[in-house]
Image (cartoon, rainbow, N blue to C red):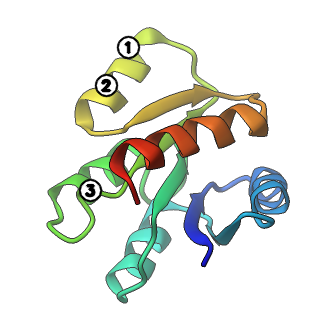
């Protein structure tokens, strides 16, 4: 059975690229912002790993991290943040709030794939 990957990004092109790349190995679900993703998760959907953008409308990436991590249902879901911001302070803030990793756009999907697999291997999902 395929692992389930939730991609949260308001840029349709990023979502489509990631869906195309990961759909061979993962069951991929796309959401366009943190608010939509949280609502979908709260409906009872199970996910193995989340890749989320930092800059999104309605609920930005930082607020998304906070919402995930305060929830007893979702607090242990691995989360990798994507961002166009390469500032160290941004990375540190995301990691301190509970992101498991942080990648700067543009990025190589293969590198993201390796990072996802490493996280999943460590938690043995």
Q: Position of residue 89 (x, y in %)?
A: 38, 13
Residue 21 vs 105, above or below: the answer is: below
The quadrant of the image that shows the N terminus is bottom right
Q: CA distance from mark 1 to mark 3?
A: 24 Å
**In the image: residue 9, left or right of residue 47:** right
Q: Position of residue 63 (x, y in %)?
A: 32, 49
Q: Position of residue 103 (x, y in %)?
A: 58, 28
Residue lying at 59% horizontally and 32% vertically, measured from the top left: 83
Q: Nearer the viewer, residue 122 or 30?
A: 122
Q: Nearer the viewer, residue 4 or 11?
A: 4
Q: Which residue is mark 2?
A: 93
**In the image: residue 10, left or right of residue 44:** right
Q: Which residue is mark 1?
A: 89
Q: Which residue is mark 3?
A: 76
Residue lying at 45% horizontally and 32% vertically, measured from the top left: 101
- Which quarter of the picture shows residue 29? bottom right
The kind of secondary structure element at disc 2 is helix
Residue 120 vs 85, above or below: the answer is: below
**In the image: residue 39, left or right of residue 66:** right
Circles 2 and 3, Cβ within 8 Å, touching? The answer is: no
Residue lying at 77% horizontally and 50% vertically, measured from the top left: 14
Tell me if mark 3 has few (under 14), some (14-19) or many (20+) residues whose alpha carbon lies within 10 angstroms of its own. some
């Amino acid at each position: 059975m395929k692992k389930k990957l939730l991609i949260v990004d308001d840029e349709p092109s990023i979502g489509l690229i990631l869906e195309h790349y990961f759909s061979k190995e993962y069951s991929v679900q796309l959401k366009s912002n943190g608010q939509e993703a949280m609502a979908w998760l709260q409906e009872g959907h199970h996910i193995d790993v989340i890749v989320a953008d930092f800059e999104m409308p309605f609920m930005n990436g930082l607020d998304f991290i906070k919402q995930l991590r305060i929830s007893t249902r979702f607090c242990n879901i691995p989360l990798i943040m994507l961002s166009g911001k390469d500032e160290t302070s941004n990375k540190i803030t995301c990691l301190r709030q509970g992101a498991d990793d942080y990648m700067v756009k543009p990025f190589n999907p293969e590198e993201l794939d390796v990072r996802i697999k490493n996280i999943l291997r460590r938690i043995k999902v």
